[in-house]
Image (tube, helix red, strand yellow):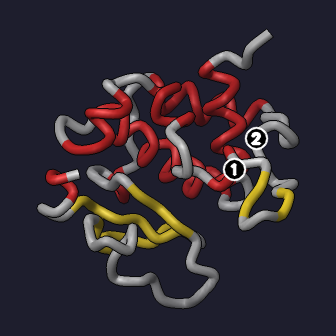
């Protein structure tokens, strides 16, 4: 039986930000939902307002991949079941709530460094906006509208 979208979202939250506390998980969940609701660009074209399409878009989330760089990726949504807190965060985001620190962000990354790169993805379609726990969050630039 296929995984429900809610289950997929809760697992993605755990895998992407499970160690970031409630604040970090809500920021990541909000950014994913921002992709669902953005009114232009790649995420509107590909996702068409559908969370599952956003979560399953190829090469967007390392946690969705079972292999990275030709090596097995044990930290993926298929291996990491969600817990109650992850469902609560998923439901919070699905209800339309947005973390105030990531209001219009479309991307996040953990740079494993003290400073966030100024742009992400590296085509400069996102500019650094905020850092919450270990993740850097990025707002779209005018280049994103062309994607």
Point 27% across, 51% down: residue: 104
Point 21% across, 44% down: residue: 41
Check whether the beta carbons of the residues at disc 1 and disc 2 lie within 8 A of each other.
Answer: yes
Which residue ends up furthest to the bottom in the rendered image? 114
Q: Is residue 100 above or below residue 133?
A: above
Q: Is residue 100 above or below residue 82?
A: below
Nearer the observer, 100 or 124: 124
Which residue ends up furthest to the top in the rendered image? 1
What secondary structure is marked by label 2? loop
What secondary structure is marked by label 1? helix
Q: Which mark is residue 77?
A: 2
User: Cα distance, mark 1 to mark 2?
Assistant: 6 Å
Point 38% across, 41% down: residue: 98
Q: Position of residue 86 (x, y in %)?
A: 69, 37
Q: Position of residue 123 (x, y in %)?
A: 31, 71
Q: Position of residue 94 (x, y in %)?
A: 47, 25
Q: Which mark is residue 63?
A: 1
Q: Pick the quarter of the image with the N terminus.
A: top right
Residue 90, quarter of the rendered image: top right
């Amino acid at each position: 039986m296929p995984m429900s979208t809610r289950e997929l979202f809760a697992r993605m939250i755990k895998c992407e930000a499970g160690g970031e506390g409630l604040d970090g998980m809500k920021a990541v969940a909000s950014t994913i939902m921002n992709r669902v609701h953005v009114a232009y660009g790649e995420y509107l074209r590909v996702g068409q307002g559908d969370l599952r399409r956003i979560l399953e878009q190829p090469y967007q989330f390392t946690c969705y991949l079972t292999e990275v760089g030709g090596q097995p990726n044990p930290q993926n949504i298929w291996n990491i079941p969600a817990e109650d807190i992850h469902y609560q965060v998923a439901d919070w985001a699905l209800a339309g709530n947005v973390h105030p620190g990531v209001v219009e962000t479309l991307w996040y990354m953990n740079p494993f460094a003290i400073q966030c790169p100024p742009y992400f993805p590296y085509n400069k379609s996102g500019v650094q906006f905020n850092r919450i726990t270990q993740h850097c969050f990025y707002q779209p630039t005018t280049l994103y509208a062309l994607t």
